[in-house]
Amino acid sequence: MTELIKNSIKFNIDRGGTFTDIYAEMPFEPHFIVEKLLSVDPDNYDDAPREGIRRILERVQKTAISRDSVDTTYIKSIRMGTTVGTNALLERKGKDVLLVTTKGFKDLLQIGNQARPKIFDINIVKPDLIYKSVMEVDERVSIVNNDVLLANQDTSLLEKGTTGDYIKIIKSPDLDLIKKDLLEYFNQGIKSIAIVLIHSYTFHKHELLIGQLAKEIGFTHISLSHELMPMIKAVPRGLTSCVDAYLTPLIETYIDNFTQGFDQGIAKVDISFMMSDGGLCPVDSFRGFRSILSGPAGGVVGYSQTTFDKDSKQPIIGFDMGGTSTDVSRFSGTFDHVFETEISGLTIQAPQLDIHTVAAGGGSRLFFKSGLFAVGPESVGAHPGPVCYKKNGNLAITDANLLLGRVVPKFFPSIFGPNQNEPLDIDATTRAFEELTKQINDFQLARDLPAMSVDQVAYGFIQVANEAMCRPIRNITEAKGYECSQHVLACFGGAGGQHACAIAQNLGMPKVFIHRFSGILSAYGLGLADLVIDRQEPCSIIYEKGNLDELHEKLAALEEKAAKELTDKGFDRSTLHTETFLNLRFSGTDTAMMTKTPLDNDYQKEFEENYIREFGFIIYGRNLLVDDIRVRVYAKGSDLKSFSIKDCDPANPPKPVTIHSCYFASGRQQTPIYLLKDLLGGDTVQGPAIIIDNTTTIVVEPGCKATMTRGTGNVEIIVGDGSAKKINTELDPIILSVFSHRFMSIAEQMGRTLQRTSISTNIKERLDFSCALFSPDGGLVANAPHLPVHLGSMQEAVKFQIHHLGKDWHQGEVILANHPQAGGSHLPDMTVITPVYHKGQVVFYVASRGHHADIGGITPGSMPPFSKHIDEEGAAIMSLKIVKQGVFQEDTIKDVFKKSRNLSDNISDLKAQVAANKKGISLMEELIEHYGLDVVHAYMNHVQKNAELAVRDMLCEISLNNNLKPIDTLHSRDFMDDGSVIDLKLTINREEKTAIFDWSETGPEVFGNTNAPPSVTYSAIIYSLRSLVKRDIPLNQGCLNPITIHIPPASILNPTKEAAVVGGNVLTSQRVTDIILYAFKACANSQGCMNNLTFGDEKLGYYETIAGGTGAGPTFNGFSGVQCHMTNTRITDVEIMEKRYPVIVREFSIRKGSGGDGKFKGGDGVVREIEFLKNFDVSILSERRCYKPRGLEGGSDAQCGLNLVIRKDGKVINIGGKNTISLLPNERIRILSPGGGGYGKL
């Protein structure tokens, strides 16, 4: 009989949303036990982790154990990863929170960065706010970091922040008044508080004072933003504090309930929780904001510790495929951390493992729409689930795998049906696929395309899902300068083994690694994790020789502080391991890189090497700044023993338990099935084959070979190139979906390259750019969903250059243009175009367009309100070769941009655009190399025709839904603020599935700058059509093929060559879009403006667009404080703005009541007030200051916008919709943006 050892069993628990997995290790037989149970089963137990522990202890002790007082005699440690916090956040089930913030910013976290989540959603949906009430505090401090401002200040009257910045206290908090206000909320029952004051990341005093008051009053949880994550940026730091206040009390309650079910010995058990950064923390230090990735983090630790070879150092891609989504991550010897990530609409600022999620999993729903196979993003969920679950569900990826024989019912638990005791229903799945196949074949045969079998249809959906899951893997490898093919794919999670080989083949990865415990790897990984204390402090020091001693002292002090937290827990200081980091960036940029201390202590060299690898260049002539210092102190984690199996006898190869019919690319094959538990070390299994365990199914594709690792019993699969059929030029709806993903992925990766390599705030932070791929004739093939206003206009720019240059465009040349007559939108939008060559011939074009902060012109920011001629708006370029024979023509560019107020940024951003195009070219070359040019060109045409088909179907659908005649005309008309008419007669021919957009009654060109080039109208039409389609379709030339557009020459929508156009792109585009959507009765008018604000002098320029309200629709309210329609640029965070520019943002809030009333209410605009601390020329270019945004179907109009200047003496002036004014120090501009119209009578 085995003798039990007290305090010896280590429990590692992953409490997921559906299942709780437990891996328990003990120094006696059976050495380990795996337990899996439902996370929520109230009829049988209160808490799944405790119940799992109890069941294992019963098995070990061979005696019954009470659920109310679990015996802890034999427990050494409990480690847990939990989704309790994540699920509470997703479901909005946290505690009531009071947000306390600086006066003027009560709505700051609601507005956020002002961008909408999905640019084509007219009905904008964001998750609910997580704070219940907001209390403003009349306090304010400002950063004084400008040399001119400091020269005028007595620094003895200033405070110094922890970053070293000087702080001016403008207003101290009235503590008596604050205490009175806090008591009011406390008496309402709110006991959790988040305190987030502007600039508290460096100046802590005011938050500490208010925190002390809250403690005295009796608030049970107090989150001070500077204590949680002292990093600049008020919005993410504020959201992080609210998340912490929202979740931590819930987690504390959960922990209390969990521990109360044990006997008194639980106090001596070592309990720790997994944090989002991959480290464990003691139970009493576990906070809500560090818990968000607690569950997935265990899996990352698990594969990193079991797959990575320290000798070869071959990097690993983690692939965790679940029911509703798939997580991918990368490990190359150290964990990759990010410090801002978004979950459930909230930006959280904390060190977290860099995990990318795509909405494709076993439960992803299958669709066939307008000739396109689509997988997700909708999920069938656990209930009703896939068709095979016997709950009247919908077809999902799990059904496809079942039909193809990749999931075998006899080896799957019988937990389905109404009584949860039946096997998977293959018959129901087959019937559902037969119905879908008939629908697909009706479509195919109507177009003289070959019919498909049920197997081909199911397999097609698998291929599309695989391609969708490849996209995030490319984003964390190729988009960051790594080769996919140099990585091992480490697969875990319940569904991943069915797809791993195929995904590795798609990406050219040579090997798949599947741990023996892959189905519970998140639990197993907890046993391999270290206890970690991660501490960070803000800094504001130039990295140079004279400051190195100060930096080392700061790091040493922070290290000792962090180490003390572990030594206080009983760890020996000599056993602790420390990593130190500097968060470095070039001055004038926003791209900081957390740089680990190199062996030679040369941070600058390490930073520059990382920068070149990721971005391809170094910025010379800029200071290297230290934004933060950081330390991670580790206490060695568990000493879990590796699972051990016997080695095989080469003379006795493994025998399958059965043979099963399974479908692969080459068709059905009789496929052997092996049980993982029967395989021995060194056994090999040649594909095709299936290996099954209690928690996972592994599909070994044809051409692949699986080997059991000796001693440990893990599965290594050497990936062959597969035996897929050769793809030809004939349309295949499956391959069509794959190419749609690939083309879009190329445009997206170009965009990521541009964002990363650019310098200016406009491109890098506000994301005012677009990237796209074009056919040899300049037609749009794929445009990543960046800015809608660029959608249709970029192809006009490419087509112009093709015809303009003709044979004078040679290999190695890159073209720059911005002129409206050359397909430009307005002059600040610079378009860089590069041909893609194959065997000496142009086969595609790639282009990137970015908004440059200044290109000359009569006002700083190059957005003059009063321009009358295009020459007044800056450098106008019809066609300029900025790269010749592969050499960047910097001298030529300097001459063209000689009147720019920020020439160095112009040059840097143009280089970034060239680099983005180069990325697109390399990816296109790979695509052509893989498939052949004829196939790529064929599917370029197929993708465009598919978009055309989707738009034709949509036009027919709208005609029927609106009870139109077979040929009928809709009419919509509106006015610009100067009275200019924009008139649309929209004729839809339902029989031919076409439409005519006739703008013939539109007013003439204006002697101002609201003229819009035709390309802007094309963009508005494509955006509107895509928004009405309401599903993902490729954004390309095909969208316009069913459309005829009539625009009269010399009109406001088709101006002459000399006309000023700067406002057309940002103002008229919004009016055109409102008119189109109004004609379709899709929604009331949105704010109809971008509220373009610029300020500057001869040395600097700043530009931003400001959010407003969106229009309500037939079934939805408008949204408040958000970018709408033709733009989606972000706003610069208030703390970043004030640190970089001599200004104070006095207010940024929702303009309550500015939206139109109705059955569905329009969204409200915003109030934005900025005080200037030095002389600046300030310009506003805006609309809807005269004509109100219209309501629809009886809904009320919204309020107009209003632009005010507040003089030093308090005098308030209305400066109208378009104006430039010189402001003195301490004078302000106050912008009230319009709301959106209401829909329907009350």
Image (cartoon, rainbow, N blue to C red):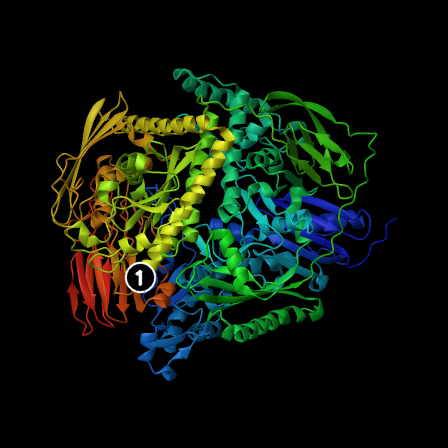
Task: Inspect this view and state whether residue 618 appears.
Answer: yes
Q: Which residue is tagged 1? A: 1148
Pinpoint residue 660: horizontal percent, then vertical percent: 67, 23
Question: Quick one: which residue is furthest to the right in this view?
Answer: 1
Report the side of 707 relative to 761 (left or right).
Answer: right
From this view, report whether residue 163 is shown above or below residue 763: below
From this view, report whether residue 1177 is shown above or below residue 24: below
Question: What crowding class fits label 1: few (fewer than 14 Cα within 10 Å), some (14-19), or many (20 or more)?
Answer: many
Report the side of 228 relative to 1241 (left or right).
Answer: right
Pinpoint residue 39: horizontal percent, then vertical percent: 61, 46
10 or 472, nearer to the observer: 472
Q: How many marks?
A: 1
Q: Which residue is located at x 58 percent, y 53 percent?
A: 294
818 or 1174, nearer to the observer: 818
Quadrant of image for the C terminus: top left
Q: Which residue is located at x 65 percent, y 63 percent?
A: 634
136 or 762, nearer to the observer: 762
Task: Inspect this view and state whether residue 393 appears.
Answer: no
Give SS at disc 1. Answer: strand
Report the side of 713 relative to 116 (left or right).
Answer: right
Q: Quadrant of residue 908?
A: bottom left
Q: Quadrant of residue 1159?
A: top left
Pinpoint residue 800: horizontal percent, then vertical percent: 27, 37
Identity of the amino acid at label 1?
A: Phe
Q: Quadrant of residue 1180?
A: bottom left
